[in-house]
Amino acid sequence: MADTEVKLVQVNMQPQTIERVEKLKITLGTQNRSEIIKQSINITEYIAQALKNGNEIIIEKKDGKRERLVIPQISRP
C-alpha cells in the first residue's frame, strides 16, 4: 500500500477514552483524532522495538531520580 493511500477506519471508544484523546490533541497541538492515533502507533512501535532489542526506557524526574518506564503489554518483567 502506498503511503498516500488513505482508508477510513472506524474505532469504537468509551467516552473516557475519547476525552483522553481530546486532551492529547491539546497537549500535542494536533488538529484531529487521527493524528493522535498515528502518533500513538509510531511511539508504540518505537518503544516496542527498543525493548525487543534489549534496551530499557528510563524516565529522569525533575529531581534527578531515574526510574524504568514499565508499559503493560510491551515491557518485559
Image (cartoon, grey):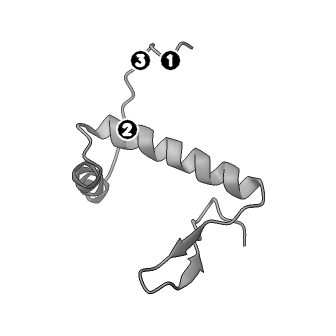
SS assignment at label 2? loop
Identity, as a three-letter code, of the amino acid under mark 2: Val
Identity, as a three-letter code, of the amino acid under mark 1: Asp
Residue 25 placement (x, y as % from top left): 25, 48
- Number of marks in the rendered image: 3
Mark 2 residue crowding within 10 angstroms, few (<14) / some (14–19) / many (20+): few
- Please identify the quadrant where the N terminus is shown: top right
Q: Looking at the picture, does residue 75 appear above or below residue 53? A: below
SS assignment at label 1? loop
Q: Relative to 68, is 63 on the left or the right?
A: left
Q: Residue at x 60, y 54 (%)?
A: 47
Q: Relative to 56, is 7 on the left or the right?
A: left
**Residue that badge 3 annotates:** 6
**Residue that badge 2 annotates:** 11
Q: Residue at x 50, y 17 (%)?
A: 3
**Residue that badge 1 annotates:** 3
- The numbered mark, 2 or 3, whose residue comes first in the sequence reads 3
Residue 58 placement (x, y as % from top left): 59, 71
How far, Cα to Cα, is label 1 from label 2?
21 Å
Identity, as a three-letter code, of the amino acid under mark 3: Val
SS assignment at label 3? loop
Q: Which mark is residue 68?
A: none
The label nearer to you, 3 versus 1, is 1
Residue 36 placement (x, y as % from top left): 35, 43
The label nearer to you, 2 versus 3, is 3
Q: Looking at the picture, does residue 74 appear above or below residue 3? A: below
Q: Nearer the viewer, residue 1 or 46?
A: 46
Q: Nearer the viewer, residue 41 or 11?
A: 41
Mark 1 residue crowding within 10 angstroms, few (<14) / some (14–19) / many (20+): few
How far, Cα to Cα, is label 2 from label 3?
15 Å
